Image: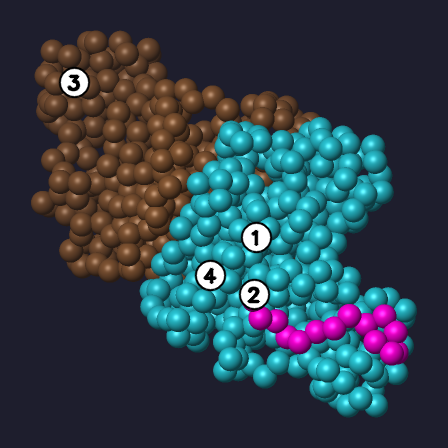
Chain colours: A brown, B cyan
Amino acid sequence: MTEPLATGATIGILGGGQLGRMLSVAAARLGFRTHIYEPAARPPAADVAHAVTTAPYEDEAALRAFASAVDVITYEFENIPTAALDLLEAHRPIRPGRRALAVSQDRIAEKDFLTGLGLSTAPYAGVDSAQDLEAAIARIGTPAILKTTRLGYDGKGQARLRAPADAAAALAAMQGAPAVLEGFVDFSHEVSVIAARGPGGEVAAYDPGENVHRDGILHTTTVPARLSPAQRSDAVLIAARILNALDYVGVLGVELFVTAQGLLVNEIAPRVHNSGHWTQNGCAVDQFEQHIRAVAGWPLGDGKRHSNVVMTNLIGEEIEQVPGLARESMCALHLYGKAEARPGRKMGHVNRVNGPARG
Amino acid sequence: MTEPLATGATIGILGGGQLGRMLSVAAARLGFRTHIYEPAARPPAADVAHAVTTAPYEDEAALRAFASAVDVITYEFENIPTAALDLLEAHRPIRPGRRALAVSQDRIAEKDFLTGLGLSTAPYAGVDSAQDLEAAIARIGTPAILKTTRLGYDGKGQARLRAPADAAAALAAMQGAPAVLEGFVDFSHEVSVIAARGPGGEVAAYDPGENVHRDGILHTTTVPARLSPAQRSDAVLIAARILNALDYVGVLGVELFVTAQGLLVNEIAPRVHNSGHWTQNGCAVDQFEQHIRAVAGWPLGDGKRHSNVVMTNLIGEEIEQVPGLARESMCALHLYGKAEARPGRKMGHVNRVNGPARG
């Protein structure tokens, strides 16, 4: 697929959550149709998609039918089973490509990749045994955090080590899964860069946003972030280096720690990212449309913003704040249409437009 | 229906064109589902709607099933057959209400209503015969324009009279339909006000936009419009007076001529309006969401804009400009997913974000 996708073509999206939902709306804005593939019933994306397949990732017939109904395939989450990807890729291009998925599905592969590019990360060491862990602690020290190498959700598969004595309990919490010990980083704040790359190698980045987490879940992203001009350009250059090294197509999220020694890469996400939701009300082309443009081989938006924005997630019962938020001036609501407000569940977000772009 | 509609409820929309499409996206942003009723196959709104009924407005069973599947009904165009409205209204509330439709479906009823409120319009007179027309010309003079009283599309059902001698030909062009003679107005430019009213009487207006037409179709809307502060407040007060007089619920578009003698009302549209598309990239709450908020009994956005915007329609083959437009900075694309670019057909629009709100 080298020609730009024509208006009216169908973009297949693996995953029907809120990211798939907002990708679907952005695709429609460019005249594309979307087809969602999602195992769970009544996914949020179904309300705004042209077609939906409800089937598990093990259903080869459903995967084949999905692939033949779409022109290109993208995804809203990175934990897609490899066998499903193999089958789909035999029929249609998958964007972003497999390399980005392989790297981001495994914490050690990701850190090896990043350090191989000359980028800084937290100190880390693979841990498969008590012996490994002892050696890792000796090198990295405590406090530290032990994580399964495959991605967990919302802080699951993680154990903190305040002191070397916590080693046995932390290892037990991994339940025998391969793990990685990460040293704590002394950082002042976290920022993230949302950047995109097209199939021709064109790269565009949004201004970095500053993230605040609460209970392990993103709470707010504020743009502009507190960064010096040099840090800001470093942040964007780091994202561009990652995009080019992966021969990436689509939007990528890069979380960075701001430290006295410079920027450290915390994590990359090969997809649109919660910390990029502010672009919906700060830019003429938001991260969702930017991803669709890249996947479709269209020209990328340049990432310029017209307004400063503070994005705040609505988690669980925070959705009950909506009647008050709806009365607030310059407050844009983005609700996901989820029926049940379970604790920790992302129900929506608001973008508060915070004056013209400055800083 | 006095309680605000709960997230997850379904809003029925009569008409599946681009306005229904953008209403559907706005409804989803608030967590609502939409169900489109549209006689034509493959309507643009279907790509982003939860459900679609494809049936004519004469199909009573389909209308009944549609009404029972939705919580409230709204529409994207005003020429809905009366019998269909009667049937639907027996089952579910229709917003905006019947009075607004009755007034806006008939040019004489509309002008009588407006002048009855003390608002100015072009001079007009009903014409059912050659005798009527002669009397009307004697009073109004020429140049003038003869129009069928029921709404035409894109300048159809209209005939210009440069001189009294054109009377016979103009009358023949009406093909026996009831008509109205409208005097020409000496205006410097046209502006429109997009305003909304909630079920509790709350009113909110966006800043007026300045409209330029080409071949009888809206070409651009520029915000801010060239208006003095007094004219701007007059424009908004005119819209508010109309909304209140109609006990209106939803978004209304009011086209105004700017003349040396003040503002004249050209036309009202009981729906979201092409000249309000700029709000998508100029405001935190756009006209589509504002309409859904009103119809759902939610608090209205306050209409403030964060950015100046120039909206340009893409008509017919102008859709071929998209690759170039996609490369332009601060240019937001809104394409309707229509397969065929027929002459005069609205294929999409762009909003050029033109700096922070000023003026």
Q: Amino acid at mark 2?
A: Gly
The label nearer to you, 2 versus 1, is: 2
Gap between marks 2 and 4 measured at Cα = 12 Å
Residue B271 seen anywhere in this rendered image of the structure: yes
Q: How many neighbours does mark 1 have within 10 angstroms: few (below 14), some (14-19), or many (20 or more)?
A: some
Q: Secondary structure at mark 4?
A: helix
Q: Based on the picture, tell me whether residue A34 belongs to the magenta stretch.
A: no
Q: Position of residue A38 (x, y in %)?
A: 57, 29
Over which residues does the magenta segment extend? B119-132
Residue A161: which disc? 3
Q: Amino acid at mark 4?
A: Leu
Task: Return the chain for callout 1.
Answer: B
Gap between marks 4 and 3 measured at Cα = 66 Å
Task: Return the chain for callout 3.
Answer: A
Q: Position of residue A310 (x, y in %)?
A: 29, 45
Residue denoted by label 4: B237
Residue at the location (42% across, 59% down)? B282
Residue at the location (71% across, 52% down)? B102
Q: If you read the primary sequence from the N terminus, does the residue marked by circle 2 or circle 1 appear first? A: 2
Gap between marks 4 and 1 measured at Cα = 12 Å
Residue denoted by label 2: B118
Residue denoted by label 1: B245
Q: If you read the primary sequence from the N terminus, does the residue marked by circle 2 or circle 4 appear first? A: 2
Work out whether residue A324 or residue A196 is closer to the camera in this orientation and state it: A324
The label nearer to you, 2 versus 3, is: 2
Q: Secondary structure at mark 3?
A: strand
Question: In this rendering, is residue B232 above or below A116?
Answer: below
Task: Return the chain for callout 4.
Answer: B
